Amino acid sequence: MVAVVILIVSGGFYLWQGYGWMVGTDASCVKAENHDIAGRSLEPLLADGQEVKGLVGYYECNPAKRGQVAILEFKTKEESFVKKIAGLPGDSVEFTEEGYIKLNGKVSNNSAGELHLFSEASRNLITIPLNNDRIPEGKYLMLSEETSSSAFDSRQFGFVEKEHLKGRVIY
């Protein structure tokens, strides 16, 4: 288990995660909560049953950054989901002939270096809302560690809006 300490100072916060201090920008909206990971979509980063800290409200006063793991909540679902932020507003999006997604000209891969595959249906789900081949303002592309086109992430539910980003996961 990793110890997490949050030191709140004027104008920001520092977060100790067992490997060093992370500099944050605003803790006024953050509430730290324990969360248990249910499922294997982010393995090997996060394991089924692993306890993590969720910084609930983090994205209300801090910008979302590529690579962060976020807690997602949808009005139509009772449970929360945890996915990685892969694409930000304004990022360019294209697909290779084989169906792999390219963000800002670079093919997207998971932490093991495997490429994220998109089916024709999931490519349409992503390309239809694009604005000049770019992710629209206020929208985010969320991906799991799974590479198959049937993974439950933006390949199934499309872009998410900032209001769906309920917090940042610290692991």
Image (cartoon, helix red, strand yellow):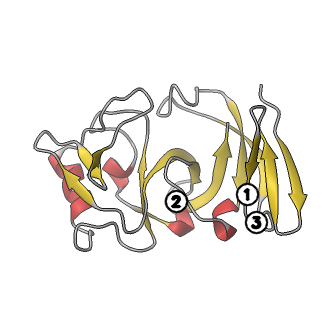
Of the residues under marks 1 and 2, which one precedes in the sequence? 1
Relative vertical location of residue 102 with respect to residue 93 in this rendering, above or below: above
Q: Residue at x 37, y 29 (%)?
A: 113
Q: Mark 1: few, some, or many residues within 10 Å (few <14, many ≥20)?
A: some
Query: In the current view of this chain or complex, which residue is farthest to the left?
Result: 97
- The reply to whether callout 1 and callout 2 are in contact (CB within 8 Å) is no
Inspect the image, locate mark 3, and give the three-letter code of the amino acid beneath it.
Answer: Asp
Question: What residue is pinned by disc 1?
Answer: 24
**What label sits on residue 108 in the rendered view?**
none
Q: Residue 97 at x, y = what percent?
A: 10, 43
Question: What residue is pinned by disc 2?
Answer: 74
Inspect the image, locate mark 1, and give the three-letter code of the amino acid beneath it.
Answer: Gly
Q: Residue at x 50, y 28 (%)?
A: 40
Query: Alpha-carbon distance for marks 1 and 2?
Result: 26 Å
Q: Residue at x 25, y 47 (%)?
A: 101
Q: Name the side, left or right, on which 142 lies relative to 27.
A: left
Q: Residue 118 at x, y = what percent?
A: 23, 43
Which element is circle 1 on? loop
- The reply to whether callout 3 and callout 1 are in contact (CB within 8 Å) is yes
Question: What residue is pinned by disc 3?
Answer: 26
Which element is circle 2 on? loop
